[in-house]
Amino acid sequence: MKESVSPAKTALLYGGIFGAIMILQLVILYSLQLDPIQYGWVGLIINFCNFIVFPFTLLILGCIAFRKRNGGYLSVSQCLKNGLIITLTGAILYCLFYAVFVNAVPGYIESSIEQTRIVKLHNEPKIAPAELTKFLDDSRKGMQPGITIPMVMIVYTFIGMIGSFIVGSFLRREKPATV
């Protein structure tokens, strides 16, 4: 009887790459301190890449690599396992780094809140001061690791499930039935 191939080895590699990419983005964006009004498009591109391009690319590469290790066969359920491991590994690595980064870099959250304030005032110049304060307080709470980490995990679980199902639907190659 042939032993089944575990998706963990392949998926952990691609999940590690995904986590490293997101960590690198955080550090680079923090280091550059871009003007949020002049370079607002950067955030759009980063989000598009983090939620669509990178997960789908790594899901495809991870599932193809697993299929090769599995004798050329891949089921949708195997792709689902593989994809969830990839996205959750990346999310866990990012979350661990984010928790350390927020606590190690003094003023990170306040710097981000200041950029948020600038953008909010640019987009809504007539906003009431009380409304702006409430918005910024809510944003500050949302950036705390206790809120950010569970949200990142939930979002990437969802992305991993949907993405893996889509990728698995295209890449699947079932083993022929044996009699």
Image: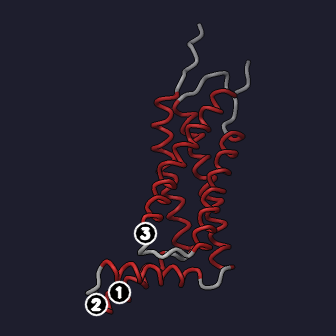
Q: Residue 71, percent across and down?
A: 67, 21
Residue at 59% across / 80% down in the picture?
Answer: 108
User: Relative to 159, is 110 above or below?
Assistant: below
Which residue is under mark 1?
132
**Quarter of the image where the N terminus is located:** top right
Give the labeled residue for mark 3: 40
Secondary structure under tag 2 reads: loop
Q: Nearer the viewer, residue 68 or 92?
A: 68
Which comes sooner in the sequence, label 1 or label 3?
3
Which residue occupies the extreme front position in the image? 38
Mark 2 and mark 1 residues within 8 Å of each other at the beta carbon: yes
Amino acid type, label 1: Leu
Residue positioned 62% across, 38% down in the render = 62
Residue 78: image x %, image y %? 58, 33
Instruction: Identify the secondary structure beneath mark 3.
Output: helix
* Mark 2 crowdedness (10 Å alpha carbons): few <14, some 14-19, many ≥20: few
Q: Nearer the viewer, residue 7 or 22?
A: 22
**Disc on the earlier residue, 3 or 2:** 3
Per the model, the C-alpha gap separating discs 3 and 2 is 23 Å
Q: CA distance from mark 2 to mark 1?
A: 6 Å
Q: Quadrant of residue 125?
A: bottom left
Of the 4 image quadrants, the one containing the C terminus is top right
| The one of 42 and 165 positioned closer to us in this rendering | 42
Classify mark 1: helix, strand or loop.
helix
Query: Which residue bears the numbered disc 2?
Result: 128
Query: Residue most toward the bottom?
Result: 129
Give the residue type that dot 3 points to: Gly
Disc 3 vs disc 2: which is toward the camera?
A: 3
Residue 154 rendering spot, x and y as whole percentages: 50, 58
Which label was assigned to residue 176? none
